[in-house]
Amino acid sequence: MRSDNQSRAKGLVNDLQNLLAKSYVIGSIELENGSISRTWIRKEIGCGQNWPNQNAQAKKIIKDFESKLHLEVKKSPRKSSPGVKDEEMKLIMARVDRLEQKNAQLLDDNFKYKKALNEYVWIDSDEEESQQAKLPW
């Protein structure tokens, strides 16, 4: 029985190695919180629930591939954020800020007018009637 479990474990290690190697080349390794998804591994090779986390060889293989992935991410050129450097962009951003302030003010005014109209019974509290354009005016 023990030899069967050992041979099965070797088979799982080989399956894991092949799965990660193929997926690394294709770029289809599933990540979860920055590390290789253990659920994905279990689903693909059909191992037990705790096997990827408890088998020493499996942990080593997974860690090696994770380090390869992290090195690849670090080596990939990142574009620096452009920021707001030129004058035209600064003007656009200032205009956006003014428009957002005006929008907030208009929303506040709209709320006040709706409240006043509700007090004067110009608008029924039933929203369906107001949506169906059954307003008194």
Image (cartoon, rainbow, N blue to C red):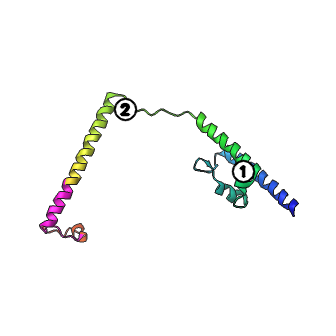
Give, as a three-letter code, the residue at label 2: Val
Tell me the residue at 37%/29% (across/down): 85
The residue most toward the top is 86
Find residue 89 and name its label.
none
Give the magenta range: 109-126
Where residue 17 appears, as percent x and y from the top left, is 75, 48
Q: Percent x, y for residue 129?
A: 22, 71
User: In whole angstroms, how far apart are the C-alphas of marks 1 and 2?
Assistant: 45 Å
Q: Is residue 2 covered in magenta? A: no
Which residue shows up at 70% across the image and 47% down it? Answer: 62
**Residue 7 in the image: above or below residue 62:** below
Q: Which residue is mark 2?
A: 84
The image quadrant that residue 6 belongs to is bottom right
Quarter of the C terminus within the rendering = bottom left
* Mark 2: few/some/many CA within 10 Å (<14, 14-19, 20+): few
Regarding mark 1 in the picture, which secondary structure is present there? helix
Task: Give the amino acid at mark 1.
Answer: Leu
Of label 1 and label 2, which has the lower sequence position? Answer: 1
The quadrant holding residue 42 is bottom right
Q: Nearer the viewer, residue 132 or 108?
A: 108
* Left or right, residue 36 beside residue 9: left
Q: Residues within 10 Å of mark 1 (few under 14, many from 20)?
A: some
- The residue tagged 1 is 19
- On the image, the x and y values in percent for residue 101 come to 25, 45
Q: Is residue 117 magenta?
A: yes
Would you say the residues marked 1 and 2 are in contact, meaning their CB atoms lie under 8 Å apart? no
Q: Is residue 97 left or right of residue 54?
A: left
